């Protein structure tokens, strides 16, 4: 369709159908990308221990690392955008069934132990129900130097950590997440999902 103004003919190009088609294509591509990401993020690996009894899952993209301190499980997210990698550790300690410590005593012991960390700062200490067990939740921060080499271009990293202290009749389980401050919110969702799905009996 054309129009003539001041002896100049202009042609009106109808692009609305094309623009609409491109818009729909972009929306579909974004939706497929989101679904693919959810599928990848939703995959998990399983971990099981018989002594002490524990079974749980963790994100499939996290890799199992060798634990030097006798932890039941230690995994880390190698894709963390920091020299310090987000990690989750599960530890267990036996309890004396004849005289088990109270939850508050267990939490206080962990606070004292963490006090040795560089720049340690307790953010909160609350109670929480984990799989029907009355448990303690600690949130704290500290500082690490991931690359401790002279003249290295590596700044210290502020680490935000969350720990659940979960006592059973004969064991206490410690589930700990440690992540760079900027990664903590995303990682804590995955961590909480793993802990809430753990079976301790």
Image (tube, grey):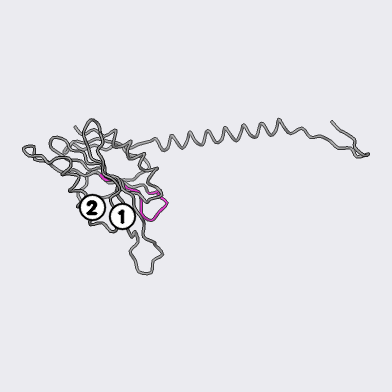
Task: Identify residue for label 2.
Answer: 114
Asked whether, in this view, residue 75 is left or right of residue 134, the answer is right
User: Residue 84 in magenta?
Assistant: yes
From the image, give the main secondary structure of the stretch colored magenta.
Answer: loop
In this view, the residue in front, 167 or 89, is 167
- Give yes or no for contact between labels 2 and 1 (Cβ–Cβ under 8 Å): yes
Q: Position of residue 152 (x, y in %)?
A: 39, 66
User: Residue 123 in magenta?
Assistant: no
Q: CA distance from mark 2 to mark 1?
A: 9 Å
Q: Position of residue 62 (x, y in %)?
A: 35, 44
Residue at image point 33% right, 40% down = 191
Q: From which residue to which does the magenta span run? A: 78-89
Residue 14: image quadrant is top right
Tell me the quarter of the image containing the C terminus: top left
Question: Furthest-left residue in view?
Answer: 98
Asked whether, in this view, residue 183 is left or right of residue 25, the answer is left
Task: Identify residue for label 1.
Answer: 142
């Amino acid at each position: 369709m054309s129009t003539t103004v001041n002896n100049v003919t202009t042609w009106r190009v109808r692009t609305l159908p094309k623009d609409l088609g491109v818009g729909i294509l972009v929306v579909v591509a974004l939706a497929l990308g989101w679904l693919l990401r959810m599928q990848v993020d939703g995959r998990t690996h399983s971990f099981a221990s018989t002594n002490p009894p524990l079974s749980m899952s963790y994100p499939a993209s996290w890799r199992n690392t060798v634990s030097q301190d006798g932890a039941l499980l230690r995994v880390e997210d190698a894709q963390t955008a920091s020299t310090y990698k987000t990690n989750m550790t599960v530890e267990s300690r036996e309890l004396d069934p004849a005289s088990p410590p109270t939850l508050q005593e267990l939490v206080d012991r962990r606070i004292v132990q963490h006090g040795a960390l560089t720049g340690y700062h307790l953010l909160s200490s609350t109670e929480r129900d984990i799989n029907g067990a009355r448990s303690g939740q600690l949130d704290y921060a500290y500082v690490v130097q991931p690359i401790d080499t002279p003249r290295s271009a590596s700044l210290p990293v502020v680490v935000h950590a969350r720990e659940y202290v979960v006592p059973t009749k004969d064991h206490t389980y410690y589930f700990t997440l440690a992540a760079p401050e900027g990664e903590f919110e995303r990682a804590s969702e995955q961590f909480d999902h793993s802990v809430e799905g753990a079976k301790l009996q």
